[in-house]
């Protein structure tokens, strides 16, 4: 297997952390590092909003994506560590999975 070296900037991690703090679910394109996010409540079907649906439609156009949600309360980890670990683990698998769900 080929080694994958990924440098994830602090700014990118901070941007994701801010979205997670606002109860958003983040989607990251592993090829371009483009990021989109939608409210957790929208994904759970609690309400419908055309703008958020358009965001999901854009994400569905990506060949692959990584989904990042808040860490479980039982995980004693800083949010930035959680984000980096999820990104690194899923980027390492990106060639074998068309869609990646990570919460």
Image (cartoon, rainbow, N blue to C red):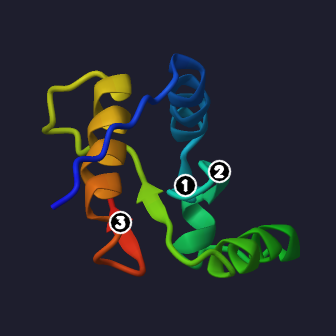
Q: Residues within 10 Å of mark 1 (few under 14, many from 20)?
A: many
Residue 30 picture location, percent across and down: 50, 57
Number of numbered labels in the structure image: 3
Residue 7 picture location, percent across and down: 43, 29
Q: In the displayed structure, does residue 81 sit left or right of residue 60?
A: left
Number of the label disc, if any, that sits on residue 94: 3
Q: In the displayed structure, does residue 55 sit left or right of residue 12?
A: right
| Residue bearing mark 2 | 35
- Mark 3, mark 2: which one is toward the viewer? 3
Indicate the secondary structure of the residue bearing disc 1. Answer: strand
> Do residues under tags 1 and 2 come within 8 Å of each other at their CB atoms?
yes
- Mark 1, mark 3: which one is toward the viewer? 3
Compared with residue 10, is residue 21 higher up or lower down, i.e. above or below? below
Residue at image coords 39%, 37% = 6
If you read the primary sequence from the N terminus, does the residue marked by circle 1 or circle 3 appear first?
1
Q: What is the quadrant of residue 15 in the picture?
A: top right
| Residue bearing mark 1 | 28
If you read the primary sequence from the N terminus, does the residue marked by circle 1 or circle 2 appear first?
1
Q: CA distance from mark 1 to mark 3?
A: 12 Å
């Amino acid at each position: 297997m080929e080694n994958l070296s990924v440098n994830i900037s602090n700014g990118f991690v901070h941007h994701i952390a801010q979205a997670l703090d606002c109860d958003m679910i983040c989607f990251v394109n592993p090829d371009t590092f483009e990021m989109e996010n939608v409210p957790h409540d929208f994904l759970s079907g609690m309400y419908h909003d055309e703008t958020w649906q358009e965001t999901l439609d854009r994400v569905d156009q990506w060949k692959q994506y990584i989904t990042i949600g808040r860490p479980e309360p039982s995980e004693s980890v800083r949010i930035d560590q959680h984000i980096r670990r999820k990104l690194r683990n899923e980027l390492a698998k990106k060639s074998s999975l068309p869609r990646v769900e990570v919460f």
